[in-house]
Image (spheres, rainbow, N blue to C red):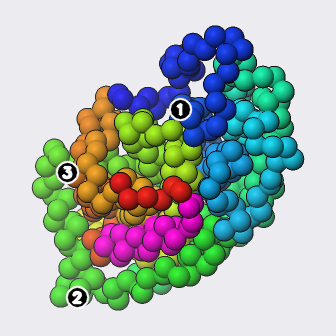
Amino acid sequence: MKVRLLLSIAILITVFSNCKKHDFPDPSPKKYSADVANAWMQLHIKLTRTTPGYNSTVSGRSFGYAGITLYESLLPGNPGYKSLLNQIGGTSIMPGKDRDDYFWPASLNAAMAMITRDFFPTTSDANKVTIDSLEAAYNSKFKDEASAEKIQNAMDYGHMVATDIFNWSAVDGGDQAYLHIVDPSYIPPTGPGLWIPTPPAFGPPVVPHWGAHRSFIANSAALTQPGPPLAYSEDAKSPFYQMVNELYTISLSLSHEDSTIARFWGDQPGNLNVPAHETNMLTQLIVNSKMDISEAVAAYALQGIAVNDALISVFKTKYTYNLIRPISYIRKVFGKGTWNSVITTPSHPEYSAAHAVVSAAGATVLENIFGKNYSFTDHTYDNTYGARSFNSFEDCAKEAGRSRLLAGIHYSPSIAVGLKQGKQIGDLVNQLHLKNYNTDK
């Protein structure tokens, strides 16, 4: 697997340079490799995979703030780059010394260590040790690359950035969401065609108020809301019935490739959740294209903003329309009481398709960074489902969306609407100004 899913400190630090002691290189972050940024985001993937409560929605929020922290912790050392915080409702912090008095990679390391601890206070003791070990490994490396004074200046600045961003995050509506993804006070509406708990757990709906959270792009959820789904009907001649029948018919003759696609993109035990998979793909792109640290943190930040806002937008849609899931309709209306989806149906309403929204939002941002017809291969699941190759980010998003139809958990119109909704989110993110970063490639 080209980019490991489980972070190994030993592997991640083998790329450390062999600088002679006190033979310090140029401290400008643009001259530095992206390894430290990649390492922290790979650790973030591991933490969302192994910490209770970090489903796709909650993780999308944490990846968003992590990407912004990466970017802002290096900002003063990048002349010509503009603050993202100042454009999305936060306030950037400027250092008190000349930019050359800081070793900027140490700022990133300190900021990410602090905000990672803040976002994962309930993770396991073993994971907490891993956070400490990663921070210490880079601090040890930096001693041969910069003076103690410049490193300490940078660490102090990174701590200020992380503190400011975490405090800002605490008032967005999703603070400590990992503790309460289910709201006992929320009572879903009832009636024909409305969502009901789905097998096998028949659990309550998760994150019912997520669509009301503060987005990074002001009003992005309201600006990207689609119209209503097809009118509910149980008449065999109705568009709604035919829509469900399309999914049911496909489910009866899935090929091996169809099943592989459904599981490859599935947010299931053993897999990464949706934002983690998106981030892992980006790490592969960063490594393969040999991005420097400044380019990498900008990419992580923009993708994180897109994924976070896509999830707010789609959950606003879901709990506006509360549409019934395929498994509920097929078992009740079609009378197929033992029919099952390929992957477990998530415990929230059907419309629109979240994976399509998130994938299209991410694809639109990555297309702006790498190019419209950028070919790549995703090696996230080499050891289980195999690699998957795409001719463009749009092709990747379309497959991710279609996977939900093949999995039996989303109707095709919900996927089509979701892809459009996600692209609208991505277009809004692409309007952010990073000045020297967004260039044609």
As drawn, the residue found furthest toward the top would be 20
Asked if residue 419 is among those painted magenta in the image, a careful observer would answer yes
Residue at 45% across, 71% down: 427
* Sequence order check, earlier mark of 3 and 2: 2
Q: Nearer the viewer, residue 232 or 174?
A: 174
Q: x, y percentage for residue 121?
A: 75, 40
* Sequence order check, earlier mark of 2 and 1: 1
Residue at 24% across, 77% down: 243
Residue 336 can be seen, yes or no: yes
Distance between mark 3 and mark 1 Cα atoms: 39 Å
| Residue that badge 1 annotates | 33
| Residue that badge 3 annotates | 258
In this picture, is 52 found above or below 307?
above
Q: Nearer the viewer, residue 226 or 441?
A: 441
**What's drawn in magenta, residue-wise?**
414-435
In this picture, is 48 found above or below 4?
below
Distance between mark 2 and mark 1 Cα atoms: 57 Å
Q: Nearer the viewer, residue 96 or 423?
A: 96
